[in-house]
Amino acid sequence: MLISGQACVHYGATQFTKDIDLWVESSEANLHYLVAALGELSARQRFLPPLERAFLERGHAVHFEVDTEAAAYRVDLMTHPPRVGAFDAAERDATESSVAGVRCPVVDLARLVELKKTQRDEDYPVIARLVSAIFRYLDGHPDERQRLGLWVCHESRSPEELLTIATEWPGGAAMLADTGRAAAVAAVEAASRRPFDWELAAGEVGQALRREQDALQREDREYWRPRLAELRALHRADRR
């Protein structure tokens, strides 16, 4: 299943990437097929850890490079990416895309947003673009807000979007408050003040979003800390 960069291309949040990130089912049989496919492509492993189920089960990514006539492509594989639960449930929710003429499942939008909540600053504008596409759709399709609006309230990275929901959507303030999210609550509180100052309100919501991003980045660093320690130990052993 495509995740990360190519999935962002599929949803229109990124124009191009040569990286191919795949979420693969972790059974021994599937990994056997995967090893065979990588062999047919003459894929070269780029970094540790090795392609072994034990490392994949502990949440590591395994990295390869594949040469083509056009370019060299990086292929990163995971069986247990963070924050998105089990593969089987994600497979049921996946959409489809065509990559080089091959039909391929693509992770659903909600899980893609979770995957992008990393320690990298550059991932948060991507999240913003992914969610903004749904916000714009809902802004023109009020009948769909009951189905998708709460997710946008949970995930929007835009002060302007959150304030628009609070001030212009019928029931929008209540929907934001129901999330319990600090940035959403800040939008509701700012929208309720009189006189309403849009610039001041946007600044307050923006500060709440920055604090939220800082917390998400800390959580991702903590997730990877033991895995990076394991990789460093592997590198030390490999040099002996």
Image: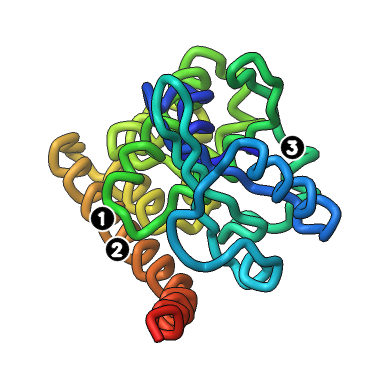
Residue beneath the point at 48% across and 75% down: 227
Horizontal relation, residue 65 to residue 157: left or right: right
Residue beneath the point at 53% across and 32% down: 7
Look at the picture and state if 75 lies above or below 82.
above
For the N terminus, the image quarter is top right
Look at the picture and state if 163 lies above or below 48.
above
Q: Secondary structure at mark 1?
A: helix
Horizontal relation, residue 195 to residue 8: left or right: left
Q: Look at mark 2 in the image and give the residue it sits on.
A: 214
Nearest to N terminus: mark 3 or mark 1: 3
Q: How many numbered markers are drawn?
A: 3
Whether pointer 3 and pointer 1 mark residues with C-beta atoms closer than 8 Å, the reply is no
Q: Secondary structure at mark 2?
A: helix
Q: How is the image coloured?
A: rainbow
Mark 1 vs mark 2, CA separation in Å: 6 Å
Give the x, y percent position of residue 106. 64, 32
Residue 210 image label: 1
Dot 3 surroundings within 10 Å: few (below 14), some, or many (20 or more)?
some
Q: Look at mark 3 in the image and give the residue it sits on.
A: 93
Q: Is residue 51 visible?
A: yes
Mark 3 vs mark 2, CA separation in Å: 29 Å
Q: Nearer the viewer, residue 46 or 218?
A: 46
Give the x, y percent position of residue 172. 48, 35
Dot 1 surroundings within 10 Å: few (below 14), some, or many (20 or more)?
some
Q: Quadrant for residue 208, please give it.
A: bottom left
Nearest to N terminus: mark 3 or mark 2: 3
- Amino acid at the residue labelled 2: Asp
